[in-house]
Image (cartoon, rainbow, N blue to C red):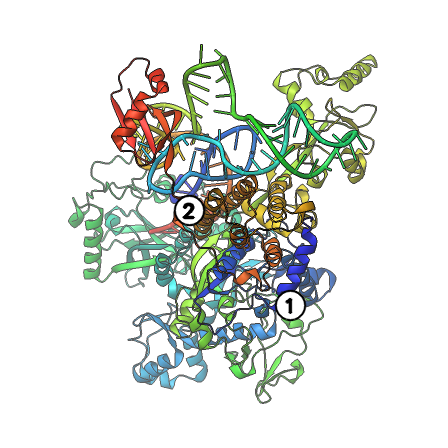
RNA sequence: GCUCGAGUGGCGGAACUGGUAGACGCGCUGGAUUCAAAAUCCAGUUCCUUUGGAGUGUGGGUUCGAUUCCCACCUCGAGUACCA
């Protein structure tokens, strides 16, 4: 009987769906195990073979854990809000919901055909109002919370208000805006409602504020820092400029330290942890306040606060530098310098973020004419502005120590500012000295002779004594902008009252559904797309969304026009899967207490500083609110590597023949080039063409052949076979401009293409669609082959040619169970041979170890070895073939189910217990010892395992080959490691 | 520049805590079967000057023994980028 994979796979996919085989129960005595994939954005292009890699790995693990007796939660859903559907809507007028729905259908079909064990009853979609109700709900919780540094957690805003009412804000230690004036309880009570609301916004964990944002004009929206790559938008590569806008932000900075600390308790890849650590960017140092020298006696003095990691170098300060955007610049610039400074500010403002980043070498700046007083020496220090100081980091001002910082050094050299040396025994005539470990401070009063660490402590101590500084930890992490000027995202549950202050809509009225609009573009007045909605106002009496013309600012108010960013919906979805249809709560406490957290999370490394940082932030917030039992949502995380494509090329000769392009088989060119010869030496066809051309006096290159004479063009990989031979007729059909071309083939008539590994992309014609692979080889072959390609975390090239190996293995395994006449199914009840037992048990051992270590590629090899051995042993015993089916089932579930059924089982193999490994089958009595001489293996010798060291040595020395190796020499030493190796030295 | 990761046959890759380098698969070569092809099966396949020797990016070191550990360097990939 044939291995009819198409039929088998369809049969079992239907079976699993009908029987809901993989539905997870929230009540179970079994131990839980939660395996999660980063959910996909359903793009229009569908899946290519690279996409399912992580899904296959997680599916194998999930299936394995079920065999091991766990209650496994393995859900899937869609991150279905997002830019592509909206861009498509702008171009075509098609509602993004329709496009999204269609794309999801394609995705679902493609996922289903791969045989994943997802519990689809738990599917969520971020664009579904039933789901985003809870995204809005979390937003409201964040709005109603502040971060108390004393308790080091988020608390209800009511507790803050009651403190204000009792004692004002002086004693409050909160993470908040830094421009809050001190007020007493009496003052608080005297404030108007609007004033109170404005103050509270400065404390809330999500807040509305005017801030500098990354505005992308081409996309018509702001972008978060992690959505910008190299100064341009991550999607589309459009320029980004700095702009001040009133936006919702998330006070993620409150969690900076905890986000850093939490990394230590999760088992995540080190590079991912590193990039989060860098992104958070903790640095320890000191805040130092300098005071400006009044421009004339009696004039004002201004404090300039700076952050420095090197307070030990404070005596090396020879100037200060402010960011051009610094608010003090206009106040302190002297009349003489005004023109210069303004010209400089204007010039820097014009430079885009990208120019500024691309050009870090040009040193520019301007002197303000003002001076600050050095806190210790009381000497005047000139104040400069320069765009190497960033407005967004620290305080936007630095104390410049040219001898200890290369940027300050370069700036000082460029503007001829003195560079005092405060390091003992260090030459600074060429460059700054930044080695902390070797630092000994000099010329620095009370810091003289101190090494770095001690000097830092002493400097901070002295600054505190003066009241001009303190030790401080600074983070690079910024609060996250949460507004997007887009249509296809979650609407905010927010309306604006008569004072223009934001108000939350009560939880019981959620979800606030996305309104219909006739255009998905910004309005003519520049408002976000929701500005086009005509029914987008909140009636506080009816508690519903009503038409805009009813707005009266007493009972009916305008709603927020921005929508939430892409990461909003994905920041808690892993918890929602635990109880996805709950309409009363985001999830029940029973569900969250049973499932707790994600045990294994698999996805791409591109989410390192976006999704994975925001999710951790929300999880910690939810933890503070007592909603979740764990403050890290995923115990273990694996980044699967990318699958790249193997592009194919044909080479078009620079010379035409009779006005036709000439395309030459790769190995002809290679031969000619490697022998420094001519093309015509390697092809008769070319030879006669050359003669013909020459006889007509058409100057043909006589020089030696080189690759420069050929233009490589991409060929669709489906036109190339496993031996890199081109289907020439297919190619001519595909590319009509080559229909008449001359193809110079090998002697045997084949035509070879060149190959190169590149990213899989349509334009390179190297995209392989899993649909075609499933059709030709089946999902089980595809699953096995994807795992077989190499380690999960590594990136590796796809080459369809190799899949025959995996497919051949399945056929061979099928035959093992079909040893009857004419290939009918047949297993015997006979006791397996000793060898077969051994083969089975070493396979059990290796496969279990491999899965636990996520080394899926090696277990595929192990299966191949196992089936090869059992085939040559002619094993068809049920006692071996039954456990083998279970071993294989996580990898190739369809064939395993089919064989399991044939073996006489009526229940799915999914729940069958994983075979137990038994050591006794592997016990050996003899070992084939490798005998090495000076570490090199020269021959093998089989010896009983119970020999003593001395007996082994004697046996080896007595062997004729030993004497032959030694050639009369006496060995200095013989190393015997029983059961392992013998090494003769000498 | 900085931080990570990786360099093993024609290719993807194996090699557990230092102990037979190249498992397994692709490709290639030869053979069987076939009218022929596909499919299948068998044998071989790191390199070289082949009764032997060399060999895991390069150079050194530790060791009886190094792909594995240490030092220096080279190359490639990923992330990040004036962060004070």
Above or below A456: residue B11? above
Between marks 2 and 1 in the image, the one whose residue lies nearer the viewer: 2
Residue A290 visible to the viewer? no
Q: Nearer the viewer, residue A563 or A3?
A: A3
Number of numbered tags placed on the structure image = 2
Seen from this angle, which residue lies furthest bottom? A541
Instruction: Give x and y (percent) for residue A748.
Output: 74, 24
Residue A406 or residue A855, whichever sits in front:
A855
Q: Which mark is residue A810?
A: none
| Frontmost residue, A183 versus A381 | A183
Residue A477: horizontal and vertical position, in percent? 41, 58
- CA–CA distance in space, label 2 to label 1: 40 Å
Q: Which residue is mark 2?
A: A921
Q: Is residue A539 above or below residue A442?
A: below
Dividing the picture into quadrants, the one containing residue A155 is: bottom left
Q: Are marks 2 and 1 in contact (CB under 8 Å)?
A: no
Name the quadrant of the C terminus of chain A.
top left
Q: Position of residue A356 (x, y in %)?
A: 49, 47
Residue A7 visible in the shown view: yes
List x then y, in percent, for residue A110: 65, 57
Disc 1 target residue:
A18
In the drawing, does residue A977 fall left or right of residue A341? left
Image position of B16 with respect to A308: above or below: above
Mark 2 Cα within 10 Å, few/some/many (few <14, many 20+)?
A: some
Labels 2, 1: one chain: yes
Q: Would you identify the image quadrant in which residue A99 lies?
A: bottom right
């Amino acid at each position: 009987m044939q291995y009819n994979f198409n039929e088998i796979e369809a049969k079992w996919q239907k079976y699993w769906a009908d029987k809901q085989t993989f539905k997870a129960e929230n009540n179970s005595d079994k131990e839980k195990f939660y395996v999660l994939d980063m959910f996909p954005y359903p793009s229009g292009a569908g899946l290519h073979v690279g996409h399912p890699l992580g899904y296959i790995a997680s599916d194998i693990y999930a299936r394995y854990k079920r065999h091991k007796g766990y209650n496994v939660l393995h859900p899937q859903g869609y991150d279905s809000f997002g830019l592509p559907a909206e861009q498509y809507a702008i171009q075509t007028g098609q509602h993004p919901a329709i496009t999204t729905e269609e794309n999801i259908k394609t995705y679902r079909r493609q996922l289903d055909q791969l045989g994943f064990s997802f519990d689809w009853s738990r599917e969520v979609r971020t664009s579904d109002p039933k789901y985003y109700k809870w995204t809005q709900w979390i937003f409201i919780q964040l709005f109603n919370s502040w971060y108390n540094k004393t308790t080091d957690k988020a608390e209800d805003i009511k507790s803050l208000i009651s403190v204000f009412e009792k004692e004002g804000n002086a004693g409050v230690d909160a993470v908040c805006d830094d421009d809050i004036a001190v007020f007493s309880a009496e003052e608080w009570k005297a404030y108007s409602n609007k004033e109170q609301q404005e103050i509270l916004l400065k404390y809330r964990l999500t807040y509305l504020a005017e801030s500098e944002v990354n505005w992308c004009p081409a996309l018509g929206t702001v972008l978060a820092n992690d959505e910008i790559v190299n100064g341009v938008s991550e999607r589309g590569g459009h320029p980004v400029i700095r702009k001040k806008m009133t936006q919702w932000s998330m006070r993620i900075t409150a969690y900076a330290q905890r986000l850093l600390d939490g990394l230590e308790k999760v088992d995540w890849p080190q590079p991912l942890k590193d990039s989060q650590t860098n992104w958070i960017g903790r640095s320890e140092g000191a805040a130092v306040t300098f005071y400006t020298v009044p421009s004339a006696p009696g004039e004002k003095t201004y404090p300039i606060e700076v952050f420095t990691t090197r307070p030990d170098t404070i005596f090396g300060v020879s100037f200060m530098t402010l960011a051009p955007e610094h608010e003090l610049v206009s106040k302190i610039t002297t009349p003489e310098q005004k023109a210069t400074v303004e010209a400089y500010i204007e010039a820097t403002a014009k430079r885009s973020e990208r120019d500024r980043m691309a050009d870090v070498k040009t040193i520019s700046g301007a002197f303000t004419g003002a001076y600050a007083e050095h806190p210790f020496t009381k000497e005047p220090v000139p104040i400069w502005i320069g765009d190497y100081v960033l407005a967004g980091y620290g305080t936007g001002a630095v104390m410049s120590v040219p001898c200890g910082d290369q940027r300050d050094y370069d700036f000082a050299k460029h503007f001829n500012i003195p560079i005092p040396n405060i390091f003992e025994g260090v030459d600074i005539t060429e460059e700054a000295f930044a080695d902390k470990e070797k630092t000994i401070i000099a010329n620095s009063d009370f810091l003289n002779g101190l090494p770095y660490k001690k000097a830092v402590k002493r400097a901070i101590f002295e600054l505190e004594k003066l009241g001009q500084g303190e030790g401080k930890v600074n983070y690079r992490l910024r609060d996250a902008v949460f507004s997007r000027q887009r249509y296809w995202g979650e609407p905010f549950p927010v309306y604006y009252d008569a004072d223009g202050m934001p108000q939350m809509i009560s939880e019981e009225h959620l979800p606030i559904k996305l309104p219909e609009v006739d255009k998905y573009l910004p309005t003519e007045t520049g408002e976000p797309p929701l500005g086009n909605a005509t029914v987008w106002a909140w009636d506080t009496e009816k508690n519903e969304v009503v038409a805009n013309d009813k707005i009266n600012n007493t009972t009916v108010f305008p709603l927020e026009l921005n929508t939430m960013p892409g990461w909003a919906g994905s920041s808690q979805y892993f918890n929602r899967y635990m109880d996805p249809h709950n309409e009363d709560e985001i999830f029940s406490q029973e569900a969250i207490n049973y499932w707790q957290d994600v045990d294994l999370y698999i996805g791409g490394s591109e989410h390192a500083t976006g999704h994975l940082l925001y999710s951790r932030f929300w999880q910690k917030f939810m933890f503070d609110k007592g909603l979740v039992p764990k403050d890290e949502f995923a115990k273990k995380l694996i980044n699967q590597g990318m699958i790249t494509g193997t592009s194919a090329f044909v080479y078009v000769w620079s010379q035409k023949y009779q006005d036709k392009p000439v395309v030459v088989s790769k190995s002809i060119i290679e031969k000619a080039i490697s022998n420094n010869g001519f093309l015509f030496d390697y092809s008769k066809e070319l030879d006669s063409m050359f003669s013909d051309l020459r006889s007509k006096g058409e100057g043909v290159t006589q020089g030696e052949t080189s690759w420069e004479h050929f233009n490589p063009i991409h060929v669709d990989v489906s036109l190339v076979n496993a031996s890199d031979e081109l289907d020439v007729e297919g190619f001519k059909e595909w590319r009509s401009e080559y229909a008449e071309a001359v193809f110079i083939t090998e002697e045997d008539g084949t035509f070879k293409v060149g190959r190169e590994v590149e990213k899989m992309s349509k334009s390179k014609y190297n995209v392989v669609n899993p649909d075609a692979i499933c059709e030709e080889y089946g999902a089980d072959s595809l699953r096995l082959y994807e795992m077989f390609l190499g380690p999960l975390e590594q990136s590796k090239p796809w080459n369809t040619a190799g899949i025959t190996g995996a497919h051949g293995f399945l056929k061979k395994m099928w035959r093992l169970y079909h040893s009857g006449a004419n290939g009918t199914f047949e297993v015997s009840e006979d006791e397996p041979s000793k060898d077969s037992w051994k083969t089975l048990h070493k396979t059990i051992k290796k496969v279990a170890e491999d899965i636990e270590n996520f080394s899926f590629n090696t277990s595929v090899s192990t299966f191949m070895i196992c089936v090869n051995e059992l085939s040559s042993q002619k094993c068809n015993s049920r006692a071996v073939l039954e456990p083998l089916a279970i071993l294989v089932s996580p990898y190739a579930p369809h064939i395993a189910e089919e064989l399991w059924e044939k073996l006489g089982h009526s229940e799915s193999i999914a729940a069958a217990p994983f075979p137990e490994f038994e050591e006794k089958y592997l016990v050996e009595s003899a070992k084939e010892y490798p005998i090495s001489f000076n570490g090199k293996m020269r021959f093998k010798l089989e010896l009983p395992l119970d020999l003593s060291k001395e007996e082994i040595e004697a046996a080896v020395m007595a062997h004729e080959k030993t004497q032959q190796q030694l050639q009369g020499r006496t060995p200095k030493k013989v190393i015997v490691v029983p059961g392992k190796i013998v090494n003769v030295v000498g």
